[in-house]
Image (cartoon, rainbow, N blue to C red):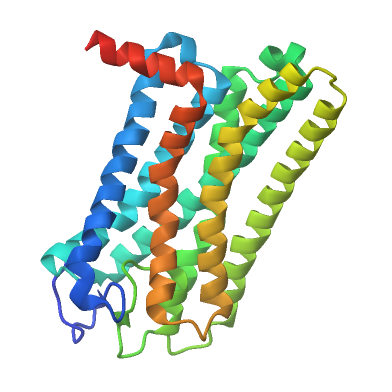
Amino acid sequence: MAVFNLTPSDASTFILIGIPGLEAAQVWISIPFSMSYIIGLLGNFTVLFVVAKEQTLHKPMYLLLCMLALTDIVISTCTVLMSLSMFWFSLKGITMGGCLTQMLFHYAGSLMQSAILVTMAFNRYIAICDPLRYATILTNGRIAKLGIVCFMRPVLLILLLPLLVNRQPVCDNRIIPQTYCNHMAMLKISCADITVNKTYGLVVAFVVTCLDLTLIVLSYGLIIRALLRISSKKAHKKALNTCTAHICVILTSYTPFLFSSLTHQFGQGIASHIHSILVNLFYLIPPMLNPIIYGVKTKELRDKLGKCICRM
C-alpha cells in the first residue's frame, strides 16, 4: 500500500486522522493495538506451524482452522500496520490506490472468514449427525474445493466495491476520521449521490452475513435435534465439547462486525470515536482470540503443540 506523510492539500491523497477526539492519546492506544496484533500473529502462525508439522492433524477440521488463521492474519495485517504507522510515525497519508487495495483485502478477508465459519459448522454437523460417513463425505480434497469457493465468493462480491468507490468524485476535504480506509468513510467525503454505493455495501454486508448466519443456525438446529435423540449423557457432552470452540469463534467474529456495521449505517447520533473503536475491535479481537479459543478447547491440537515445544 502506498503510504506517505502528506498534508490534506495534496490532491492525490487522503488523510487518516485515526480515532477522532483521541489524537493526543493515540500513542497510548497503540500499546493495546500492537499487543493484540502480536498475540494474534503468534497464535495464528503457531496454529499453521503445528498443523503443517503434524501429519496426524491433516484432517478437514484442522485444514479449516488453518484457513481461518490465514484470513485472521490478512484482516489484521491490512489494517493494523496502517494504524500503527499513523500512531507511531504520523504517517497519515494514503493514496486512492492504497485505500482501494486496503478495502479489497479487508472486506474480502472478512467475507471469506464468514464463509469458512459456515463450512466449519457443516463440518460439525456431518461429524455429529453422520459420523460413519464423515471420512467419505469430507475428504481433504473436498475441503480444498470448499476453500476455493470460500475464497472466490467474497472476491467476486467485493471486486465491485472499490470500482464503485473509485468512480465517485471526492470533495476538497479528503480527511477520513478512521484508522484505515473503509467504505462508509470514503462515501462520506464524496460529492456525488452515494445511493448505489451505500445500497450495494449494505446488501453485501447483511445479505451475505444473514445467509451465512442462517446456514450456521440451521446446522446447529440439526445438531441439537440429533443430540436429543441420543440418550447417553457422555455422548451429549462429547458432542457439545466439539462445538463449543466453534460457537465461541462465531460470537467473537460476528458480534463486533454487526455492531460496527449497524453503527456505520444507522448510528448517526453516535460519537465518531465510538464508531472508530468499534471498527478497530472487529479486526483486533477475532484474530487474537480465535487461536486461543481453539488452543484451549481442542485437546488434540493442544497435545501436538506440547510435543512440538518439547522437540525444540
Up-down relation of residue 109 to residue 102 (above or below): above
In this view of the protein, which residue sits in the foreground, 249 or 66?
Answer: 249
Residue 76 placed where, x, y %? 35, 50
Q: Nearer the viewer, residue 169 or 229?
A: 229
Q: Nearer the viewer, residue 68 or 259?
A: 259
Asked whether, in this view, residue 11 is left or right of residue 52, the answer is: left
Instruction: Report the number of numbered marks.
Output: 0
* Residue positioned 56% across, 34% down in the render: 245
Question: Which quadrant of the figure contains the C terminus?
Answer: top left
Q: Is residue 20 above or below residue 191?
A: above
Residue at 45% in and 73% down? 165
Q: Is residue 311 depicted above or below 236 in this figure?
A: above
Quadrant in the picture for residue 230: top right
**Figure quadrant of the N terminus:** bottom left
Q: Residue 86: in sight, yes or no?
A: no
Q: Residue at x 40, y 80 (%)?
A: 272
Give the image location of residue 203, x and y in percent: 64, 66
Residue 175 seen: yes
Seen as rendered, the residue at the extreme right is: 229
Q: Quadrant of residue 189?
A: bottom left
Front residue of this view, candidates 37 and 122: 37
Residue at the (28%, 56%) spot, across then down? 33
In the figure, is residue 150 to the left or right of 92? Answer: right
Depicted 15 relative to depicted 234: above or below: below
Q: Is residue 17 left or right of residue 154?
A: left
**Residue 5 drawn at (x, y percent):** 13, 71
